[in-house]
Image: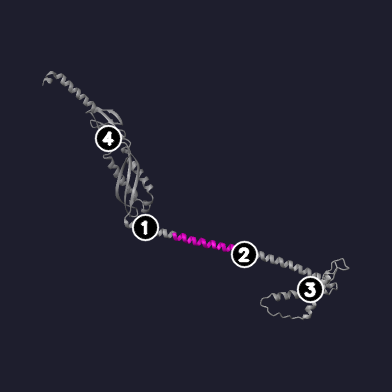
Amino acid sequence: MGFLSGIGAVEIFSFFFAFLGILLVLMGIKTVSQGMEYTVERFGRYTKTLRPGLHLIIPVVDRIGYKLNMREQVLDVPSQEVITKDNAMVQVDGVVFFQIIEASQAAYEVNNLQLAILNLTMTNIRTVMGSMDLDELLSQRDTINNQLLDVVDKATDPWGVKVTRIEIKDISPPRDLVDSMARQMKAERDKRANILEAEGFRQAEILKAEGEKQSAILEAEGRREAAYRDAEAREREGEAEAKVTTMVSDAISGGNVQAINYFIAQKYVDALGKIAAANNQKVIMLPMEVTGILGSVAGIAELAKEAFSKDGDGGAVQPWGKKE
């Protein structure tokens, strides 16, 4: 009481107002963290948005309306049942990535922003996936994601939100449908295996036929070449025979009887050689006189003597005695 009695009423009021002023200043100072934005309301009306940093507002008159996270956020989409175009029931869930671009719109254009985005996404999942067959649903996830992103992003644009990604996490058909798909896949693989096996057999047969064709062609080419060579040999043999016959005819016309013996003896010897060369001939029947054959052989010997005799004559002597 002694202390209060020593201080006047003016000093007390001065201390009170000083304390109140300091309190009001502290109430007016607002610090906004990085990645956050605050909306300021004056008597309940939005006036401005506080960005990261230090700010001063009018105490009592101004107040913080909403504290909004401006970083990219992720929102889980719970599993839901979707009926496809071909009346297949599937369980689908996913995730949504979004970011607030305009704080004032996110705060005042929609009530409960995350719930609104979630319900909008779930509704469009049913719409987009319900317009597709099950096979398309399972094989075209990128198409589904892009369609959902386009629709949801346009719908949330008035809320000051940018939907960056929508990803379908899992598509779960019923168990019986999974079993049917497995059997279908197995049948399809068996079909492809049979087709490939048949194609392999067909290709092998084609290659075999091509090989046989080439072999037949080469064999025919060989026979043709052999026939050509045989014909050429027979032609040369015929020319030689004709030449010999001409020479023998000239000798006979010249009066040399030994030429006839030479010609006949040659034919005899050739015929006997062919008969002796046959494997199935054990006994040789000679339908001619032995003395005639010996005479022909003797004629051949006489011709040989005359051919090799050079005494008293400088020219070469042919087997039938005609000088050149």
Question: Which quadrant would residue 193 be assigned to in this image?
Answer: bottom left
The amino acid type of the residue labelled 4 equals Lys
Q: Nearer the viewer, residue 53 or 154?
A: 53
Q: CA distance from mark 2 to mark 3?
A: 41 Å
> What's the magenta bit mostly, secondary-structure-wise?
helix
The amino acid type of the residue labelled 3 equals Phe
SS at mark 3 in the image: helix
The answer to the question of whether label 3 and label 1 lie on touching residues, with beta carbons closer than 8 A, is no
The answer to the question of whether label 4 and label 1 lie on touching residues, with beta carbons closer than 8 A, is no
Residue at horizontal 35 percent and vertical 58 percent from the top: 180
Give neighbour class at mark 2: few <14, some 14-19, many 20+ (Cα, 10 Å): few
Q: CA distance from mark 3 to mark 1?
A: 95 Å
Q: Does 120 lie within the magenta span?
A: no
Q: Which residue is mark 4?
A: 67
Q: Which residue is mark 2?
A: 219
Q: CA distance from mark 4 to mark 2?
A: 96 Å
Instruction: Specify which label sits upstream in the sequence, 4 or 2.
Output: 4
Q: Which residue is mark 1?
A: 182
Instruction: Specify which label sits upstream in the sequence, 4 or 1.
Output: 4
Residue at horizontal 40 percent and vertical 60 percent from the top: 187
SS at mark 1 in the image: helix
Q: Nearer the viewer, residue 229 or 99?
A: 229
Instruction: Specify which label sits upstream in the sequence, 4 or 3.
Output: 4
Question: Which quadrant would residue 258 be assigned to in this image?
Answer: bottom right
Q: Which residues are magenta?
A: 193-222
Give neighbour class at mark 1: few <14, some 14-19, many 20+ (Cα, 10 Å): few
Q: CA distance from mark 4 to mark 1?
A: 52 Å
